[in-house]
Amino acid sequence: MTAPVFEHLDEISAALSSAPHLLLGLDFDGTLAPIVLRPEDAAMSAETVSALGCLAARKDVTVAIVSGRALTDLKSFVHIDLILAGNHGLEITGLGLNFRHPEGQNKRERLHQICAQLSRRLLSIPGAWVEDKGLSASVHFRAAEESAKEEVAGVVNATIGSDHKDLIVRRGDQVLDIRPRADWDKGTAMRWIRDRLPHRSTAVCYVGDDETDEDVFTALKGVTIRVGEYDSTAARFFLHGPEEVTEFLGWLLNARRSAEGLPAQEGWRRLSVNR
Ligand SMILES: [Mg+2]
């Protein structure tokens, strides 16, 4: 049963506060930044940036943001020294890591052609549009009429071909993600990152709001947190939205400080006491 984070802080603290090292993974849209109609308008609040920056600056915490966005796109929203994984983990950079999945590279041309075809075919559906992200693609339909949304899925399936031999389509929140068929997802990407950390006894916490984040919840042992509304989840805990994620980050920062015998940082203590 998925449980509210703030009613289980003792259990979460036991897992995360005093582990010698902590790997904290987070999705971006809908987790760190509120969902917006146009992806380019996304932004983290000042509080989120501050909490994330404080955690990332700690030597005993490694922070990774794992997103469906292209890495170059993701970089324009995050100006903190941490690990960034784009295209659902097909490309990873930061803190000395550098990775591009070979299957993503191999399928670039095919994906590019698919994107061009889809852009033409979706012209007749206002509010639907294609984003070519290099190693994967997204068909967005948040702004489309409700009645046209199924039609978008039909166009995508017809364009890719029913066998989906080399590409897979996965439905997210108001988006269809098209990715190369590869044994790789956000879950394997997080495991790949964890296995490259020099620290033994790394505790893992992952927070995300997407269907693709379910791959991480099932791939990793640790504190798993689903954000927002969902039908079913493999995560152990839930938070309601990005504001609560920020509050949780502040709490986590102080939990690590308190385990070292340091006093809570003022701004974050206020958030915790208010609850
Ligand atoms: Mg998300």
Image (cartoon, rainbow, N blue to C red):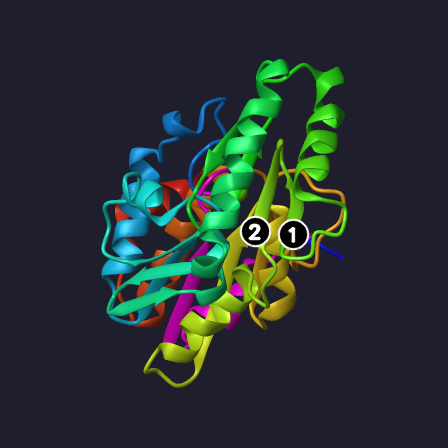
Q: In this rendering, does residue 163 appear at all? A: yes
Q: Viewed as shown, does residue 42 lie left or right of 121?
A: left
Splitting the image into 4 quarters, where does residue 11 fall? bottom right
How crowded pointer 1 is (Cα within 10 Å; few <14, some 14-19, many 20+) is rated as some
Q: Determine if residue 5 is in view.
A: no
Q: Residue 122: horizontal and vertical position, in percent?
A: 60, 22
Instruction: State whether residue 137 is above or below residue 54.
Output: above
For the residue pair 259 and 5, the one nearer the viewer reads as 5
Q: Amino acid at mark 2?
A: Arg
**Residue 168 percent coordinates (x, y):** 65, 52
Magenta stretch?
A: 3-31
x, y (%) of residue 47?
32, 38
Query: SS at mark 1?
Result: strand
Q: Residue at 75% across / 27% down in the picture?
A: 150
Q: How many marks?
A: 2
> With 127 as the anchor, is 203 left or right in this view?
left
Q: Which mark is residue 141?
A: none
Asked whether, in this view, residue 275 is left or right of residue 268, the answer is: right
Q: Is mark 2 within 8 Å of ligand 1?
A: no
Please say whether residue 115 is one of the residues in the magenta stretch: no
Q: Is residue 140 above or below residue 183?
A: above
In this view, the residue in front, 247 or 139, is: 139
CA neighbours of label 2 inside 10 A, class few (<14), some (14 to 19), many (20+): many
- Can residue 5 be found in the magenta stretch? yes
Q: At numbered mark 2, what does the secondary structure look like: helix, strand or loop? A: strand
**Residue under the point 52% across and 48% down:** 110
Q: Which mark is residue 179?
A: 2
Q: Is residue 169 above or below residue 261?
A: above
* Position of the N terminus by quadrant: bottom right
Image disc number at residue 168: 1
Instruction: Tell me if label 1 and label 2 are in contact, CB under 8 Å.
Output: yes
Q: What's the residue type where badge 1 is placed?
A: Ile
